[in-house]
Image (cartoon, rainbow, N blue to C red):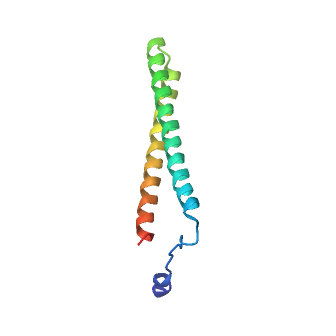
Amino acid sequence: MTTIITDISVRPDFSGLPPSVLQGLIHLTNNAAALLTLISGLGIVVSLIALVIASFTANPQLGERAKGGIAVSVGALALLYIGVAAANYAGHLFGQ
């Protein structure tokens, strides 16, 4: 059973793609990662502003929602970072 699993080898062949398509795909992934990072950063900023407002108005419900928003935004940013790191690792792994 283990010999069957170790026989599987995936080597993508990008030589058939035109250079412009390959560069376009690279730019698209970079732009998507940048956009998701900006959205996550905006979520952190909005949550921090809500936390400050909750502190000034002594509103515990708004404070809890703001803390949850910060946790979600930081979690999304961490998942994005892990995804980019995994994609870079896989790209170097299959690029040889």
Q: Measuring from the top left, give residue 15's x and y in whole percent.
A: 54, 72
Farthest residue toward the top? 57
Along the line of sight, the residue nearer the viewer: 25 or 72: 25
Q: Which residue lies at the image location 48% right of the left edge and 12% below the top edge? A: 57
Up-down relation of residue 15 to residue 63 (above or below): below
Quadrant for the C terminus, please. Answer: bottom left
Up-down relation of residue 12 to residue 38 (above or below): below
Along the line of sight, the residue nearer the viewer: 31 or 43: 31
Q: Measuring from the top left, give residue 81's x and y in whole percent.
A: 43, 49
Q: Which residue lies at the image location 46% right of the left edge and 33% below the top edge? A: 70
Q: Measuring from the top left, give residue 93's x and y in whole percent.
A: 41, 69
Q: Which residue lies at the image location 56% right of the left edge and 57% below the top edge? A: 25
Q: Measuring from the top left, give residue 62's x and y in whole percent.
A: 52, 22
Count of labels shown?
A: 0
Along the line of sight, the residue nearer the viewer: 20 or 65: 20
Along the line of sight, the residue nearer the viewer: 77 or 20: 20
Q: Which residue lies at the image location 43% right of the left edge and 59% below the top edge? A: 88
